Amino acid sequence: MNRGDRRELIFMDDADRQRFVDTLGEVCAYVLMPNHFHVVVETPQPNLVAGMKWLLGTYTRRFNRRHKLFGHLFSGRYKSLIVDGSGNGYLKSVGDYVHLNPARAKLVVADAPLKNVTWSSWPAYLLAHSKRPAWLRADRLLGWWGIPEDSPVGRQRLERSLAEFIIAEELKLGRRQEADLKTRPKGDSVKVALAARLRAETTMTARWIAERLAMGTRGYLNHLLYRRRKLGE
């Protein structure tokens, strides 16, 4: 990842964002934020330094030429972390972190699905293979989610997999059963906490969460979450 010099904007508009995406090489996931970006890039050859130098230098020249500016755009050298995709699950964790970044930064409108974030690879993951950029390796993360088929059914499963994983994890930690979601009150504090985590860490809408956790309507769920934030819980 890299951030703008003095944390200033590195994308003025969608034309800048499109130029950056056009400059990308072969990647697994990406998200463009207002003043920084995250890219999960696969390097079959040991040429990351040369590749990133070209990417950042080329985009900076295009950005400056378009906006009639001069000088640095990025704040020094990019930050990189090695991701071992051989079997420890770290690739999946990093991909999820990148795709959820706009939600954590509160750039996603309440109750809006994450696939509405245009400048992220997540919406492309939900498209048919023929409609994705040729360099986007969606198969890598699909495999880590245990989804062997790059099909409409498989992509639908991808949207729900993360949410269901969190629900199962929370139920196990709380020593609760699936049936407890139906029997406990709609405003139960445990269910509200789980709903808050789902909104913060997944792509699912408030409507889906309200139905899945038996918490009534979308409006009532949003009210519960607002009250929770106000109380600082």
Image (tube, helix red, strand yellow):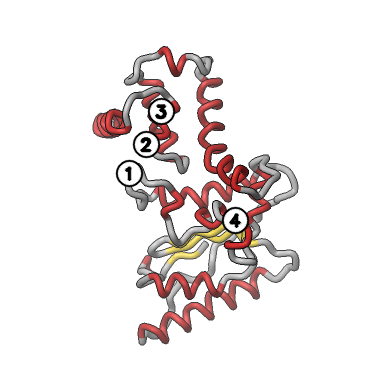
Q: CA distance from mark 1 to mark 4?
A: 27 Å
Mark 3 is on which residue type? Glu
The crowding category of the residue bearing disc 3, from other C-alpha atoms within 10 Å (few below 14, some 14 to 19, many at least 20), is few
Q: Which mark is residue 128?
A: 4
**Residue at the (48%, 75%) spot, across then down:** 19
**Between marks 1 and 4 in the image, the one whose residue lies nearer the viewer:** 4
The crowding category of the residue bearing disc 2, from other C-alpha atoms within 10 Å (few below 14, some 14 to 19, many at least 20), is many
Mark nearer the N terminus (2 vs 3): 2
SS class, disc 4: loop
**Residue at the (56%, 43%) spot, across then down:** 156
Mark nearer the N terminus (4 vs 2): 4
Mark 2 is on which residue type? Ala
Contact? badges 1 and 2 (CB < 8 Å): yes
Q: Which residue is mark 1?
A: 110
Q: Nearer the viewer, residue 40 or 52?
A: 40
Q: Which residue is mark 3?
A: 211
Contact? badges 3 and 4 (CB < 8 Å): no
**Depicted 180 relative to depicted 16: above or below:** above
Q: CA distance from mark 4 to mark 2?
A: 26 Å
